[in-house]
Image: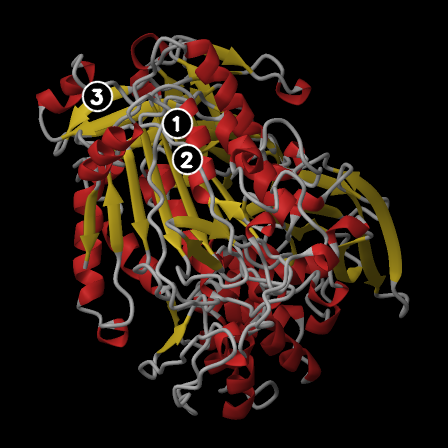
Amino acid sequence: MSDSSDRSLNLNFLKEPVLRKLCEALDKTNSKGWRKLGEMIGNDRRFRVSSDEMEMCSLKVLELEGSPSRVLLRLMGDRGCTLGHLVDLLQTMGHTEALQCVKPPGIQILIQPQSVAIIVGHNLRLSCYAVGKAGVQFQWFKTKEEVGSLLGFQLTDAGFYICRVNCGDSFEFSQWAQVDVLNVATSYGETLSFTSQSVHGQRCYYPQGQRLLVGDSLQLECGAVGRPIPRYQWHRNGVPLHFPEASKRRLTIPYLLLEHHGKYRCEICINNERTWTNEVDILVGMSLSFILQYYNDDIDPTTDKVALLIGNLSYRNHPQLKAPMVDVYDLTNLLRQLNFKVVSLLDLTESEMRNAVDEFLLLLHKGVYGLLYYAGHGYENYGNSFMVPVDAPNPYHSANCLCVQSILKLMQEKETGLNVFLLDMCRKRNIHDDTTPNILLRVTANIVFGYATCQDAEAFELSSSGFTNGVFVKFLKKRLLEDEKITVLLDRVAEDMGQFDATKGKQALEIRSSLSERRALTDPVLPGDSSDMALAHNRQWAKAHELPESMSLDFDCGAQIKLGFAAEFSNVLVIYTHIVKKPEDMFFCQAHVTNFSPDLDIDPKEMNRETPEETGIYLLSSSLPQHCLYTRLSSLQKLRDQLGFTVCLQGSFKAMDELVDWTTDVNIGKPLIARLDLYRTMRRNSCLQTCPMPHSPCHSPRAEHLHHHPQGLLSPHCSSPYLDVCEPLQGAVGGSGCVSSTLYDNCFSRYGCTSSDSPGRASIPIETTDDINELQTVFINSLQFHHQ
């Protein structure tokens, strides 16, 4: 006789599967749940529990997988309560579901019907198999209406089905099964078979691009044939959409806004296998002319939009920064909404920065919008801006840094449609670098510079115990999605920054532009003639953003582990492990990852943490699944070989005290940016070969060969990015000639660097002609200089 049929059995000796189902039934019910059961036994002296004990039960809801019902049943068992007593109480309560857990069933349903997706007109068999004390009979219902056999399912046959199993006077209902019917002929475009062997022969159907106006309704459909019914997740510009419609095969946005413009695709999952639909363009405009104007011969169409975002914060020889990580993360998500292909990187060395720029340039071709954002230490000499890598020596020179104007020159050679530079760094003079660059730029009407601060001034980040934006991005992100000419948008950002009391008079956005046409970051992408070239560039970008497939790992003990992956940045990978199932007699089970490549320099103390924040995942934590162990792998660009590691499962059983280990090795290849081998030294036509100046950047000098200024190193005050408002500096002048200043109590100087009183000479973009002076004058007059 089974446990559940012995009325004299003490509750503490119920088998775990029965107890678990019983607790689930009592925990999830309010009016007939464990509290009601506690009230009823309060009237029986034998099993009565005190108010303090009921409070102890209620506190279990605060624990992970805690169960108030389990504690209450244990207390009842300690007082001698038997299964017969419990059955009588549950019958009095009328708790049918809980009774089904403890009473031996007269009918057992052995095979439940499964949800399925089929093509309209196809036949379908829903199966239910049951046994009983006598012969059993079956009835099928669609919702509440009884149905017979269906041949050739139509659209109207889609819905939820259930089977009633009858045995004499008793009956049982099966689980609900959903039938989804796909009308391929009218709703979908091309078809594609799954390539994975486990889902061989099943087909998915893809959405099609649309051009719509603001206020229109958007409907995108995809679908897949399979059993069980597939799961769907829609993405826009590579970012998952988080609203109820986004997890259905039909995505509906009833009222379109400009921000809904972008590339859409859907992730389809069947039996733990996933595939993606094709990516389709959804163009959203203000009027019909908006869609048509980009075919006008006067304005070349935008063939693609590419952005390189670099945030340097963990400097080896200079003060550390905080805001660049948050700034790059926020701008990445916003630019993806604008249909940009974004490469976002943190903490790059000199060679890694140069190689990243090389890869960025490979994505550019005629008509492409190119955007470069940099946040970190920097300086400006003679009108040329220099970005400082994390391994730059102290002091640093132009040979150790990247010249922004050199990158612009290479972008111009690609015949890009728009070149935008957003430089969130200090623009102080570097007294240790007395070189005079001579960069020859073309005269083009498509250049926009947005400097976070004015010439010979500093940029700031807000003082906070948490993670906040720098001042520039704090206001930029509020405007970035606006459908305005880029210079108009930056003008509005400058006005917003000018009203910020903390930096008023200290930091002001400066805009320099030669833009003659209305170019906006919201412009739709219309592929040009070089479709093969664009396809090759898309593959190059996708190669650096391909996440490893999530996987299920089965261990000999019967446990199953899910190994999942997420990207925080293009060079930061998050790994999480989750226990999918474990043997019934295993009461402790945990999976962790270990034995990573030494290239990544991971601190074991920050691996396999119970919350994302404990391992440094502050920005992506809300998007990750819960109840996992998390590990953050940064600096993937340093990975020289494929990424292999060990997954270790630890468990203990009721019959033994010691922990038992099982291990399996996993190799996920080169994830994300690691595929591009940025760790390599100089390759291809690097941007450093475009800066002809003393201390040739073609060969970065070692520290002992660097040119040292006779006045020595930076002043201690000037080398710090922070101005301590608790102890204001009293105008101390260091050897570098830098005068310290004080800010408001909620703002720190962000990118402090060297300064000088010597005036800088403007860097004039020129090309070699017989009349250079005239050409310089024309180009300078075309630059619109805004000093807010």
Disc 3 secondary structure class = strand
Q: Is residue 374 left or right of residue 676?
A: left
Cβ–Cβ under 8 Å for marks 1 and 3:
no
Q: Is residue 319 left or right of residue 420?
A: right
Label drawn at residue 412: 1
Q: Which residue is mark 2?
A: 408
> Residue 353 or 386: which is nearer the viewer?
386
Mark 1 is surrounded, within 10 Å at the Cα level, by few (under 14), some (14 to 19) or many (20 or more) other residues, namely many
First-in-chain label (2 vs 3): 3
Cβ–Cβ under 8 Å for marks 1 and 2:
yes
Residue 33: x and y, percent?
Answer: 46, 69
Label drawn at residue 211: 3
Q: Is residue 468 above or below residue 537?
A: below
- Residue 4 visible in the picture: yes
The quadrant the C terminus occupies is: bottom left
- Residue type, mark 2 in image: Leu
Q: How many marks?
A: 3
